[in-house]
Amino acid sequence: MAAVLGVRCGGRARPVLRVVSTTTRLLSHGTKVMYQADNPQAAAFSPLQKVMLRPDAFHGKVAFITGGGTGLGKGMAAALSALGAECVIASRKLDVLKQTAEEISSKTGNKVHAVQCDVRDPASVSNAISQSIDAAGHPNVIINNAAGNFVSPSERLSANAWKTITDIVLNGTAYVTLGIGKELIKAQKGAAFLSITTIYAESGSGFVSPSAAAKAGVEALCKSLAAEWGRYGMRFNVIQPGPIKTKGAFSRLDPTGAFEKKMIDRIPCGRLGTVEEIANLATYLCSDYANWINGAVIRMDGGEYVSMAGEFNELLKVTEEQWNMMEEMIRKTKGS
């Protein structure tokens, strides 16, 4: 059942069999309106809203998710709980965490613990880790999802603005990862770590330079630890999501809504992504089915990155008549 750390949690988890009947309803967050588009190809790539793995895939396992009260973090926590995990969700807003914990637990019958944690503060992270281990035991799954971002011309950024983003994204991921990792090493237990970054961690991007730099650092951290800490039974992977419409992200990155259609138009699959799709990939990467995936960075963006990267991709706008004309011109060209 849902619990807030520091308060004794009573009651027994309901049988795993109940999860089967709640899985579809649990993951139906009403995101249909968020990915609808006029592009005809979107119908060929319609998203599923069911969990992918078998209902007992995480039975007996503990998952620790930062930023777990809303958005992608909530979706991943819901999916893990539906698959049998005992979840610990962490963020700064305890009231939001409590509500989410109750909501997920009431649907899955599995315990969801809420623990207050400011990932920017090493002492807060250390305290949250201790409370989590006391309540649920050492985690088998750790998802670094807490993030902060906003659009701004780089010349307008203050030192505090830069520090706020990098403290949450890069330092927060490091504090959680290293803190839990050290506890696991002492306990001689392995785990699957997953970090959520972005497609522009690879390319960089104007107007979000603190986030781009911090997310690139997170990816370097994960690849470094994948090489170093595999010997301790730990593995580290990364998901780079493309645009997924959640309130927290879009309110800061597209506050007027003007860029949403442009985003959809440049995605070959013709729509935005959904929380459920990220949750399914996340649960797979953190499951025993993916035990040989370590140090991987997986892009999940409907093809947006390659669409923007190709030098001649704008030729998609050329009509059949224009192609006919261009072909004739090319054929008549002599020499090199």
Image (cartoon, helix red, strand yellow):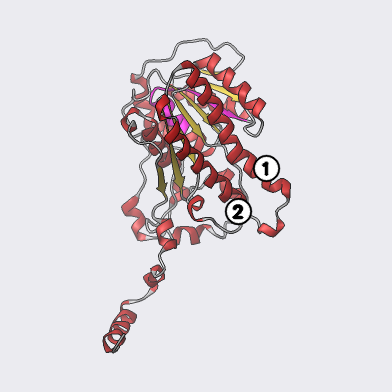
Q: What amino acid type should be assigned to the residue bearing mark 1?
A: Thr
List x then y, in percent, for residue 154: 66, 57
Mark 1 or 2 closer to N-term? 1
Q: Is residue 4 above or below residue 249?
A: above
Q: Look at the image and say whether residue 86 sits in the magenta stretch.
A: yes
List x then y, in percent, for residue 27: 42, 34
Q: Which mark is residue 254?
A: none
Left or right side of 249 for 296 = left
**How far apart are the two marked residues, 1 and 2, measured between alpha carbons?**
13 Å
Residue at numbered disc 1: 164
Residue 4: tell me if it is visible: no
Q: Residues within 10 Å of mark 2 (few under 14, many from 20)?
A: many
Residue at numbered disc 2: 209
- Res 165 quadrant in image: top right
Left or right side of 6 for 219 = left
Q: Look at the image and say whether residue 174 sits in the magenta stretch.
A: no
Q: What amino acid type should be assigned to the residue bearing mark 2?
A: Ser
> Magenta segment, which residues?
76-91
Q: Residues within 10 Å of mark 1 (few under 14, many from 20)?
A: some
